[in-house]
Image (cartoon, rainbow, N blue to C red):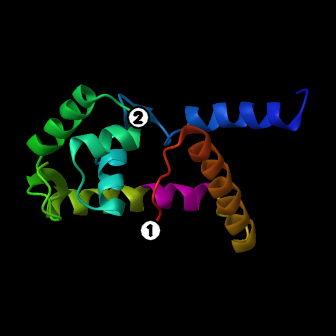
Amino acid sequence: MDTPTHEVEYEQLLLSRHTFLNQRGGRRKNSLLERSAYILLSRIQVQGPMSIGELSDAFGLDASTLNRQTAAAMRAGLIERIPDPAGGMARKFRLTDEGLRLVDAEREGIVDILDQVMHDWSEDDIAAFAGYLRRFNHGIEAIGGRPWPRP
């Protein structure tokens, strides 16, 4: 590796390969949700009800892609359409009780895997790693202009 940045690039490549352990067809082994559904539901969970336009801006995806994703999530009973709580014209999507249950269960499954991966790490090492990842993601978000809300 020529520079530390080259090493970061390579390790990031390897990390994306493992996302999140044993994925097949967009779903990790023993997963409850496909990756795209997990990301969509997680965003709505953190931010609150969102319209197609807001989702498009947040993800940098065209409305047709998000229409397909939200339609699939609605068919699965994970989200529902509601009037804008702020009184706007656009209808918004919010998690159903089942959607909330599944996104929380999926997150716990991922956290369990992370606990296995880092079983011999100190709490300080885990906290430092989380801090570096947060800083890395903030840098990406700043360049892309699409910050991700954090709980």
Task: Give the mark, 2 or 1, whose residue is nearer the N terminus.
Answer: 2
Q: Is residue 103 above or below residue 34?
A: below
Tell me which corner region of the image, top left, top right, bottom left or bottom right, holds residue 56.
top left
Residue at 37% x, 32% y is 26
Tell me which corner region of the image, top left, top right, bottom left or bottom right, holds residue 44.
bottom left
* Amino acid type for the residue under numbered disc 1: Pro
Q: Is residue 72 above or below residue 78?
A: above
Callout 2 touching callout 1 (CB < 8 Å): no
* Nearest the eye: 102 or 93: 93
Nearer the camera: disc 2 or disc 1: 2
Q: Is residue 83 above or below residue 56?
A: below
Percent position of residue 35, x then y:
37, 40
Residue at 17% x, 52% y is 93
Percent position of residue 41, x then y:
29, 51
Percent position of residue 130, x then y:
65, 61
Q: Would you name the residue on which mark 2 appears?
A: 60
Is residue 12 visible to us here?
yes
* Amino acid type for the residue under numbered disc 2: Gly
Is residue 31 visible to us here?
no
Residue at 47% x, 63% y is 150
Percent position of residue 30, x then y:
35, 46
Residue at 14% x, 56% y is 88
Q: Would you name the residue on which mark 1 appears?
A: 151
Magenta-drawn segment: 110-117
* Nearest the eye: 74 or 59: 59
> In which quadrant is the N terminus drawn?
top right
* Nearest the eye: 16 or 142: 142
